[in-house]
Amino acid sequence: MSAVERRLRDSGFRAIAGTDEVGRGCLAGPVVAACVILDTEPTLVGVNDSKLVDHDDRIDVCRLILRRARACAVGVIEPRTIDAINILQASKRAMIAAVENLEVRPDILLLDAVTIDMDLPQVPLIGGDRRSVSIAAASIVAKVYRDLLMESYHDLYPVYDFRHNRGYATEGHQAALKLYGPSPIHRRSFEGVDEPMLLFVRNGADGDPTR
């Protein structure tokens, strides 16, 4: 997975950054991107597309990435903005924010099948998180960051079970949405989020509200 980076170094590039995002398909929570510039020799055991790394191993691999990275940063775009500009544009904005938050200015940017509106050389790679160690590293950092963030939201909104579903459209999550309606961190523009609740209030014969 380091072949792309080696070819770029042979062409004179030194600060080679990979960026990727997670959370595009979720019903709740932000979309999060990470940008990572690795050491000169970017071979990292265990680094792969975050979807292929076991949950129990992901944090350890993330720690390894952070130890070996020359620079690493994240970008977070909240649900309200996702609803306003759509998830694709929000994902790109998160990646731009991650790049801009780096302490080191990249010479070139590797992305997973997209380009972003930045004045940098860019290489969009189809299946990039399985072809580039830099993109894969970014996907893991973004995934760990977002998972921990969603787990912290569980304490605020426990009925949705964010600790386990992280905002994805599991059966339990969708059932909670139908029962309780959306929380402040749900994406109301997404299908199935802003549907009528099953719980409703009606007036009984005595005028007292009955659930």
Image (cartoon, rainbow, N blue to C red):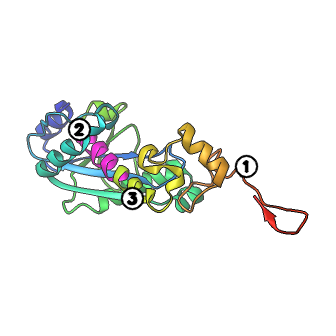
Disc 3 to disc 1, C-alpha distance: 27 Å
Depth check, front residue: 132 or 199: 199
Residue under pointer 2: 57
Q: Of the residues under marks 2 and 1, which one precedes in the sequence?
A: 2
Side (left or right) of 106 relative to 28: left
Mark 2 burial class by Cα count in 10 Å: few <14, some 14-19, many 20+: few
Element marked by disc 3: helix
Q: Residues within 10 Å of mark 1 (few under 14, many from 20)?
A: few
In the picture, the disc for residue 152 is: 3
**Which residue matches tag 1?**
198
Q: Is residue 64 magenta?
A: no
Q: Residue furthest front?
A: 206
Q: Write the start and end of the magenta stretch as one range.
A: 134-146
- Of the 4 image quadrants, the one containing the C terminus is bottom right
Marks 2/1: CA distance?
39 Å
Give the label on residue 155, or none. Answer: none
Q: Secondary structure at mark 1?
A: loop
Instruction: Please indicate whether residue 50 sits to the left or right of residue 134 in the image.
Output: right
Q: Which amino acid, by three-letter code, is at mark 1?
A: Leu
* Residue in the foreground of this view, choosing between 56 and 191: 56
Q: Earlier in the sequence, mark 2 or mark 3?
A: 2
86, above or below 81, in the image: above
Name the chief secondary structure element in magenta.
helix
Percent position (x, y) of residue 20? 34, 45
Specify the farthest residue to the left: 41
Residue 171 figure quarter: top right
Asked if disc 2 and disc 3 are in contact, CB closer than 8 Å, the reply is no
Res 117 seen here: no
Front residue (pair 88, 142): 142
Residue displayed at 39% across by 53% down: 151
Q: Crowding at label 3, few (<14), some or many (≥20) Cα neighbours within 10 Å?
A: some
